[in-house]
Image (cartoon, helix red, strand yellow):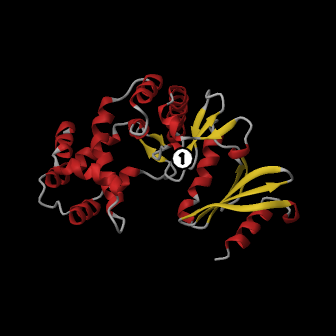
Amino acid sequence: MNVLKHIYQELSLLGLSHDKIDNLKEIRNQNGVYLYRIKYKNKDLVIKYFEKDEFRREIKYYEILKSLDIPIIEVMGYTENTLLMEDLDKSLHYRLGIESDLSDIEVAKALASWYKKLHYEGVKFLKNNDRRFYKEIDYITKENLELIMNKTNTRDNKVWQLLIEHLDLIFLKIEEFEETFTYNDFYWTNLVVRKDKKEAFMFDYNMLGVGFRYSDIRNVCSSLSDEAGNIFISEYGEINQNEKKIDEVISILVSLIQACKRDIFPNWANEALDKVDNGELYKGILNIL
């Protein structure tokens, strides 16, 4: 595929004249998602082009979050395939995240405010909209549990019989939780911070979907330092302990399923596999029955 040809076609649809476009440079190219930096009439912009339909949902998410007044990167325009956004590397007020943000308590406070607003607005939005969104919980099927057993060579572990016998009950318990938008993909590489640290928010919404609040809290705090994590939780507010109990099981299963769908089992999933072998997953299931 001639990517540049498609990029220029998208820029035309966005109303940008080709003769005023300078310095079109590729930033990233991964899984059919292309990121280019451009300069247009002395403005620094980034264009994100989605070759595959499955990833274009991110365009809709930007639109929804903006309508809910949730802080996002400024979007200058979009088409069915493309987002045109400000270039944060050239921003006067914001910067991209850095690894030390994971231990910065000011950033942790600002992040908690963003997640709290995402979850609050997500609940209201979903109550009034019946469209279908990505859900991590949808990974958990009997077929995918078979995949884990086969690929990890753990079929003889007693945890699988316990889980399969009670899977419907676990799903019923999950349905009792209030659904909201969950970001699902926290890391400093997806982070935007205002230069005075009074505001922080996430970008790249390909993994954003619907779930329950605690899955995001765990997802964030697993990367933050202990101090920053405690500040995040304190700033966020009350945690639903029943959500926490179920998330301790669901997060292990989702990690293993995602890992087992790859050709080579990734190192980041070894911790989840250890929890199968050492009985922690088994105890977690008993804890929610």
Label 1: which residue?
Answer: 189
Snapshot quadrant of residue 113:
top right
Residue at 34%, 66% in the rendered image? 264
Q: Amino acid at mark 1?
A: Thr
Q: Position of residue 56 (x, y in %)?
A: 59, 59
Q: Position of residue 161 (x, y in %)?
A: 14, 54
Residue projecting furthest to the bottom: 1
| Closer-to-camera residue (234/171) | 234
Does residue 70 appear anywhere in the picture? no
Q: Is residue 16 above or below residue 72?
A: below
Q: Quadrant of the N terminus?
A: bottom right
Asked if residue 270 lies left or right of residue 209, the reply is left
| Closer-to-camera residue (277/212) | 277
| Closer-to-camera residue (20/236) | 20
Does residue 21 appear anywhere in the picture? yes
Residue projecting furthest to the front: 100
Label 1 packing within 10 angstroms: few (<14), some (14-19), many (20+): few
Residue at 33%, 56% in the rendered image? 267
Asked if residue 8 lies left or right of residue 149, the reply is right
Residue at 35%, 29% in the rendered image? 240
Q: Position of residue 175 (x, y in %)?
A: 34, 42
